[in-house]
Image (tube, grey):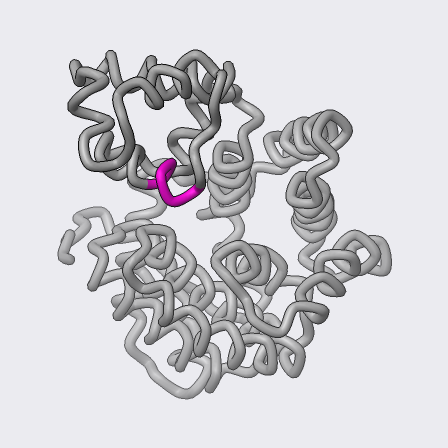
């Protein structure tokens, strides 16, 4: 769908006349030329139109591309979901989708997503950073190192590759990420990235038996999940915090057992298995609560 066609469709769907949309921005005749793809507006005019239509640029692009499932935003959301739930088959399908989109558009973003999917698949086989995994992540890591100032995209892909870093790399990268992240706090995407950077840093530190930093980052993740009322993230953060606390000497298993019971109750089977394996590897035993006290 061409730009003007998409703009006209949205305007009509919102029962807005050309005069109402164009008033104070440019003439109605100019808008008519835009909708007929005779004339393209300057960027400032384009964003004024989108603001008046209450449409984000990302949403407009999705509509313009006729709701294609291979949009950047859709693939990114699907990767996040599959990674969170430890769904290897879905990640494999997403890697193929990203590859097809990259061949079609030559956009570097799709190439990054394909590599991230392949790296996640490698990692989920045995929770080990192999040479193959490192090679998949290398172009993404190189891209991040070559950018002095990160924006939401860079913050997002950093979040996606934390599992592949060593603790020293992760802590150096995270200082840049957390400092830069706060600038974008007014964006909805900020909330997801903030929570998951802390979750992934906590998990990484735990993998390397750095339980003090694991406890620190999981506490940050708990605070963020409470602030944004994100139940899934709160459950995971509290499990990480409980594991770290137990390894640091705590004997209070109640939080761990309650949240593991929640995963079981909510049928997050892959994630439950993943945490159970992690607990077994760390020598931590737990019991399932039959009556789950749900609090938030």
Nearer to the camera, 161 or 291: 161
Picture coordinates of residue 125 (x, y %)?
71, 47
Q: State which quadrant residue 248 falls in.
A: bottom left
- The quadrant the C terminus occupies is bottom left
Q: Is residue 208 above or below residue 292?
A: below
Q: Which residue lies at the image location 57% right of the left edge and 81% below the top edge?
A: 171
Q: Is residue 204 above or below residue 46?
A: below
Q: State which quadrant residue 46 falls in.
A: top left
Q: Which residue lies at the image location 28% right of the left edge and 60% below the top edge?
A: 186
Q: Is residue 159 left or right of residue 102?
A: left
Task: Please tell me whether the stretch drawn in magenta is mainly helix, strand or loop.
Answer: helix
Within the magenta stretch, is there residue 44? yes
Viewer can see residue 235 = no
Picture coordinates of residue 57 (x, y %)?
40, 38
Q: Which residue lies at the image location 60% right of the left edge and 64% below the top edge?
A: 162
Q: Is residue 269 above or below residue 140?
A: above
Q: State which quadrant residue 190 falls in.
A: bottom left
Q: Which residues are magenta?
A: 43-47
Picture coordinates of residue 39 (x, y %)?
47, 23
Q: How many marks?
A: 0
Viewer can see residue 233 = yes
Q: Is residue 48 left or right of residue 294?
A: right
Nearer to the camera, 119 or 294: 119
Picture coordinates of residue 287 (x, y %)?
34, 58
Q: Which residue lies at the image location 31% right of the left edge and 18% below the top edge?
A: 29
């Amino acid at each position: 769908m061409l730009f003007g066609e998409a703009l006209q469709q949205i305007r009509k769907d919102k029962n807005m006349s050309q005069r109402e949309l164009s008033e104070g921005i440019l003439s109605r005749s100019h808008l008519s030329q835009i909708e007929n793809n005779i004339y393209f507006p300057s960027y400032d005019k384009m964003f004024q139109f989108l603001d008046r239509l209450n449409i984000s640029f990302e949403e407009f692009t999705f509509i313009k591309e006729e709701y294609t499932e291979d949009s950047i935003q859709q693939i990114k959301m699907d990767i996040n979901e599959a990674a969170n739930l430890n769904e290897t088959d879905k990640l494999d399908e997403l890697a193929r989708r990203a590859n097809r989109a990259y061949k079609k558009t030559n956009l570097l973003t799709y190439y990054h997503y394909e590599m991230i999917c392949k790296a996640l698949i490698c990692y989920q086989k045995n929770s080990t950073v192999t040479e193959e995994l490192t090679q998949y992540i290398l172009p993404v890591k190189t891209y991040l190192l070559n950018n002095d100032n990160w924006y939401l995209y860079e913050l997002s892909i950093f979040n996606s590759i934390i599992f592949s870093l060593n603790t020293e790399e992760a802590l150096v990268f995270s200082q840049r990420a957390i400092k830069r992240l706060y600038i974008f706090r007014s964006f909805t995407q900020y909330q997801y990235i903030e929570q998951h950077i802390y979750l992934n840093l906590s998990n990484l530190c735990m993998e390397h038996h750095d339980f003090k930093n694991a406890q620190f980052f999981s506490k940050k993740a708990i605070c963020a999940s409470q602030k944004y009322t994100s139940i899934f993230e709160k459950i995971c953060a509290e499990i990480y915090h409980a594991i770290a606390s137990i390894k640091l000497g705590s004997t209070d298993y109640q939080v761990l057992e309650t949240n593991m019971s929640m995963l079981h109750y909510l049928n997050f089977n892959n994630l439950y298995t993943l945490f159970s394996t992690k607990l077994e590897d760390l020598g931590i035993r737990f019991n399932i609560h039959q009556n789950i006290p749900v609090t938030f």
